[in-house]
């Protein structure tokens, strides 16, 4: 582990702080208790930090990705909603999702047979498995197959293989940028079976309204049905976060399909009502 | 107007910043374009600031209360939800709400006959009416009666007078602390007619979970029915915000009662689904 203090952290009055800049006009500072892990991978600077406000956090290139306190919200919402839409999800592909949280949620469904988790950066998986158990659950289900390669290349060679594809990416800057391109969604379409569906995180309706709108528009142009749903992730800028579903057949969530005894955010009413969007979001689409 | 820079603002690299501390472990910094208004009232330091990320903002003692960009979310949600629950709301009391945004929303209901707006700090109303039109709408509806006095004292002398009471307070620190006490909710109960209902903002389920739980518990102990609903206000810490309704009869929102052509957050589906709470919030209550 790097013994020199990472450039993303600064010291003020004897305390360590991680500062996130949002569009240069808004900054969020997290007081840091301890640097648990810090390593430069081939792709990005990977840190696990222990913070006072949110417990342990994964930060990539200094940007908070998930935390012990609210990581479950994002991971429950990107997993259980599509699993409650598809009538018999058996073959699952996760692109990204190196924190293992989405895969952990999907393992709660007994009828799922295989989960391919394609993460470009092995170091993210190792860091979260070893140092962020609140999110990763130290995932060891034999149905999960870790594949450390580029998700775009991986999915290009697949056809009619998956029931559900989950794109659990970081922001569309750096390595994740290609995961927001139309050609990538076309590859996903091809990789899905005839009744398959995909879901991706589609950023904040406040701070990244244009990316959200564009993602919904691109997915709408390829899939028979597209719909947006929302959740509140307190550590993401503005709190509000959007997800976009693209389906070859329908988008009708059935709350009776929900599995998991220990869910902290999603429940049966929310499986449906997360699709009730605020008016300004509807106006954007 | 004060020509000296308010203590709540600091200069870094030639830029002006407002810093909000949340429990000492999380800080949010807003880059400030201009100080529009800054004055010490008898109760608090009132500022209207022009920020890069959220446009004009009202800050009291350095804490952001409402902004041009998302002030409508809070104001729509604290107003339209109770107005869609009560079958014939005519006499309305707002305690606090000096930014005039809640009163502006209630004026969209033609059958409302009178709105008493009891704000302790006249300077807040003047500042928002003159310098924050995106929130206040320079409210001038003759049904709105401004009463500049202590809301607790005002409501003590009322009995069976109001259909709906809205408690639009700041955080339970300083002048607003009494608006979270059980004796205050008892006064509200007395001031309401036999089919009346009240709503208050009940803080963040993430950062102020105990206040939220206690508020719900106190209101439950006085009113026949109590329920919590939520909205996402990006400028509030964590984004997620809760409201608690207490009703002498029922809490059944009817979306058909919704009024307003220009709503930006609330719409007919949300009037009902804002009561579908995440599991961790249900677990807290």
Image (cartoon, coloured by chain):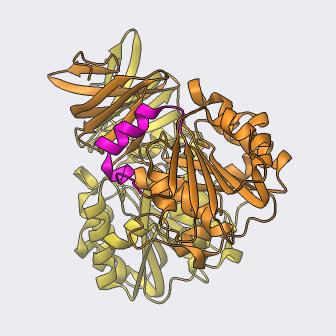
Chain colours: A yellow, B orange
Q: Quadrant of residue A132?
A: top right
For the residue pair A44 and B70, the one nearer the viewer reads as B70
Point out residue A134 in the picture as x, y percentages from the top left corner: 60, 41
For the residue pair A207 and A3, the one nearer the viewer reads as A207
Work out whether A284 lies above or below B167: below
In reply to whether residue B132 is colored magenta, the answer given is yes
Residue farthest to the left? B14
Residue A12 in sight from this viewpoint: yes
Work out whether A106 lies above or below B186: below
Point out residue A125 in the picture as x, y percentages from the top left corner: 45, 46
Looking at the rendering, the stretch of residues picked out in magenta corresponds to B119-140
Residue A135 located left or right of residue B246: left
The quadrant in which the N terminus of chain B is found is top left
In reply to whether residue A77 is colored magenta, the answer given is no
Q: Quadrant of residue A214?
A: bottom left
Residue B94 located left or right of residue A38: right
At 47% from the left and 36% from the top, the residue drawn is A57
Q: Quadrant of residue A7?
A: top left
Point out residue B2 in the picture as x, y percentages from the top left corner: 26, 19
At 60% from the left and 73% from the top, the residue drawn is A272
Point out residue B122 in the picture as x, y percentages from the top left corner: 45, 33
Residue B226 located left or right of residue A214: right
Magenta stretch, overall SS: helix
Work out whether B151 lies above or below B245: above
At 45% from the left and 71% from the top, the residue drawn is B260
For the residue pair A180 and B12, the one nearer the viewer reads as B12
Residue A107 in sight from this viewpoint: no
Work out whether A203 lies above or below B42: below
């Amino acid at each position: 582990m790097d013994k020199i203090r990472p450039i993303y952290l600064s010291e003020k009055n004897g305390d360590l702080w991680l500062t996130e800049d949002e569009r240069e006009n808004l900054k969020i500072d997290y007081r840091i208790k301890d640097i648990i892990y810090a390593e430069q991978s081939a792709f990005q600077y990977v840190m696990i930090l222990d913070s006072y406000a949110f417990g342990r956090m994964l930060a990539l290139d200094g940007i908070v990705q998930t935390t012990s306190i609210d990581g479950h919200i994002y991971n429950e919402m990107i997993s259980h909603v599509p699993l409650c839409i598809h009538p018999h999800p058996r073959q699952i592909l996760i692109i990204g999702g190196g924190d293992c949280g989405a895969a952990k949620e999907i393992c709660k469904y007994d009828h799922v047979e295989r989960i391919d988790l394609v993460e470009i950066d092995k170091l993210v998986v190792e860091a979260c498995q070893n140092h962020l158990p609140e999110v990763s659950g130290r995932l060891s289900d034999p149905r999960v197959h870790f594949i450390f390669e580029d998700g775009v290349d991986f999915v290009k060679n697949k056809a009619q293989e998956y029931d559900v594809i989950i794109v659990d990416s970081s922001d569309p800057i750096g390595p994740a940028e290609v995961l927001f391109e139309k050609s990538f969604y076309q590859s996903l379409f091809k990789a899905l079976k005839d009744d398959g569906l995909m879901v991706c995180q589609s950023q904040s309706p406040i701070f990244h309204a244009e990316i959200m709108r564009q993602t919904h528009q691109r997915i709408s142009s390829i899939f028979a049905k597209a719909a947006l749903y929302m959740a509140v992730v307190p550590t993401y800028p503005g709190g509000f976060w959007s997800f976009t579903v693209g389906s070859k057949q329908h988008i009708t969530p059935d709350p009776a399909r929900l599995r998991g005894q220990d869910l902290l955010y999603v429940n049966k009413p929310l499986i449906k009502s997360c699709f009730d969007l605020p008016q300004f979001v509807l106006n954007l689409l």
